[in-house]
Image (spheres, grey):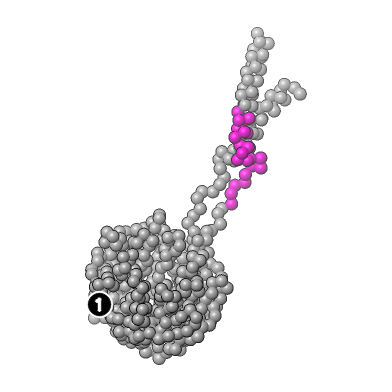
Amino acid sequence: MTRTVRLLLLSASPILLGACAVPFISSSAPGPPANPVGAYGHEARTVSPAFGPGLALLPDGRVVAAGGSGSRGAVADAEIYDPTSSAWSALPGMPVARGQATATTLADGSVLVAGGLGASGEILATGLLFHPGGAWTPTGSLSAPRYGQTALPLKDGRVLLVGGWSQPSSFGQNALPTRAIDRFDPSTRRFAPGAAAPAVVQGAMFASLPDGRVLMAGGDDPAHGSTSRVWLYDPSADTWTPGPPMPVSRAYGIAITLAGGQVLVAGGDQMAAQPGGVQTGPIQPGVVAQGPPLTTAVLYDPTANAWSRVADAPPGINQAFGGALLLHDGRAVTFGLNFSGGPTADLSAIFYDPATGKWSTGAPVPVTVTGGLSPVLLQSGRVLLVLGSTSLVFDPEATAPAPPQAPVHPLASPRLTPWLLVIAAILLMVLIAQYAQAQLRSRRRTS
C-alpha cells in the first residue's frame, strides 16, 4: 500500500468516526411535548332519548341520569352509565317526571334530585333521593317550586339551591328568576329557606370557595344588562355580602374553583338592557344567549378578595354547554359547540392551565347534538359527555402523537460516542504528525 493511500485512509478515519458521533452531539430528539389536548373515545347510546337529564357521579364510579325533557315534555326515565362496560342501562323510573332539575351526589352516596318541570309543565317543589341500590325515596318539600336552578354542595354537607325560576316562563313572556334560596340537610332530608339573594340576575356564575362560602358573580340584570356585581354567601351565617366587582361585566360565563382556591371566570356574553327592565324566560338547554361573546378571563382570589386579568380565552365558552370541570392534573376544561346547521356541531375541548396561565384548544370533532351538552368527570379522570341520546368519552390527558424523529446513524450509540470522539481526536493528531513529516521530507529533498 503506497504512502499516498495510507495517508488518504488515515485522513478519512477522523471524519468517519466523527460522523458516527454527530447524531448524539446534535440530538435529533424532539422538544418538550405540547400540553395534552385530549382525544375522544367510546360512543354509547343512552336508554332514554330525553335531553338535559340531571347527572351525578356515584361513589362506585357509575353515573346516574335522572329525568330530562323529551318531545312531549318532561320524563320520569332514569338510567345508569357503567364506565367499565361503557354502556347505559335502565333504572327504575322516578315517581314523578321532571326536567330541568338538579342532581347532586351527597356524602352518603345517595343523589338528591330537586325541583324541575313536571310532565304538564307544572313547576315542582318536591325532591327525591336516589339510592345506589336503585330505590327512590321522597324528601321534604322545597320552600318554593323552582326549576333551572344551580345546586352547590356546601362544605358542611348540605346542598344550596340558588337561582332558577318559580313562575312559568318561556321566550317572549316576561319572567324574573327567583331570589329565594333553599338549603337541603341530608341528616333530616328536609329543605330550609335561607336569606334571599340580594339581586335578581339571570346567567350568573356560581362557585364554591375553599372556606365554605359561595361566590355569585355577574349575570344579566334586567334593567341594566350584563353586570359586574359580585356577592358572597356565607351559609353558616346565612348572609350575603358584596364583593369586589369583576373587571368586565358578563353573563352566562363559566366559573370554576381551581386547585389553588382561586376562581376562574371566563366566556359568556355582554347583554344589553331590556325594555322595561324585565327578562324573558330562561336559556333552554343547548341554546346560547345572544350578545357579544367575551374572550376576557379573570381570576378571583378569595384570600386577597380581589380580581386579576389572565390571558384571553378562546371564543365559544358559555355555561349553556355544561360549565367547566377541574381535571386531575389541575387544569380546567370546558367544551364549546360550533353549530354548522341542524343538529350537527363541531365539539371542542377548551383548557386553562393555571401553572402556565395559558389556554389551549383541542381539535374539533363533529357530533350530533339532539339537546344540550352535559359533562361529568369520571373517577378515571376521563370526561363523560352526554349529548341527548348519545354519550361520548373524552380523555383530557391524551397527547397528540409527536412528530417523527430524524433517523439516527446506525453506528451511533450513547456509550460508543465518547470513545469515537477520543479515537477521532487521536487519529487527527496522527494525521497532523504524518502531514508534518511529509512536509519536512519534501523540503529536505528539494534542498
Can you say whether 307 is above or below 89 in the image?
Answer: above
Q: Is residue 121 left or right of residue 249?
A: right
| Tag count | 1
Q: Position of residue 206 (x, y in %)?
A: 33, 71
Specify the quadrant that holds the N terminus: top right
Q: Quadrant of residue 181?
A: bottom left
Can you say whether 208 is above or below 404 in the image?
Answer: below
Q: Position of residue 120 (x, y in %)?
A: 40, 91
Q: Is residue 138 left or right of residue 201?
A: right
Residue 203 colored in magenta in the image: no
Q: Give the residue furthest to the top.
A: 447
Residue drawn at the location 28% of the way across and 75% of the way down: 201
Q: Is residue 165 left or right of residue 327?
A: left
Name the residue carrying label 1: 195
Residue 422 colored in magenta in the image: yes
Q: Could you tell me which secondary element the residue under label 1 belongs to?
A: loop
Res. 133 in view: yes
Q: Give the residue furthest to the bottom.
A: 120
Q: In this orientation, which residue lies closer to the viewer: 416 or 112?
A: 112
Res. 116 in view: no
Q: Position of residue 81 (x, y in %)?
A: 52, 76
Q: In this orientation, which residue lies closer to the viewer: 137 or 380?
A: 137
Residue drawn at the location 43% of the way across and 88% of the way down: 96
Identified by mark 1, the residue type is Ala
Q: Residues within 10 Å of mark 1 (few under 14, many from 20)?
A: some
Residue drawn at the location 31% of the way across and 70% of the way down: 214
**Which segment is the magenta one?**
404-425
Q: In this orientation, which residue lies closer to the viewer: 132 or 362?
A: 132
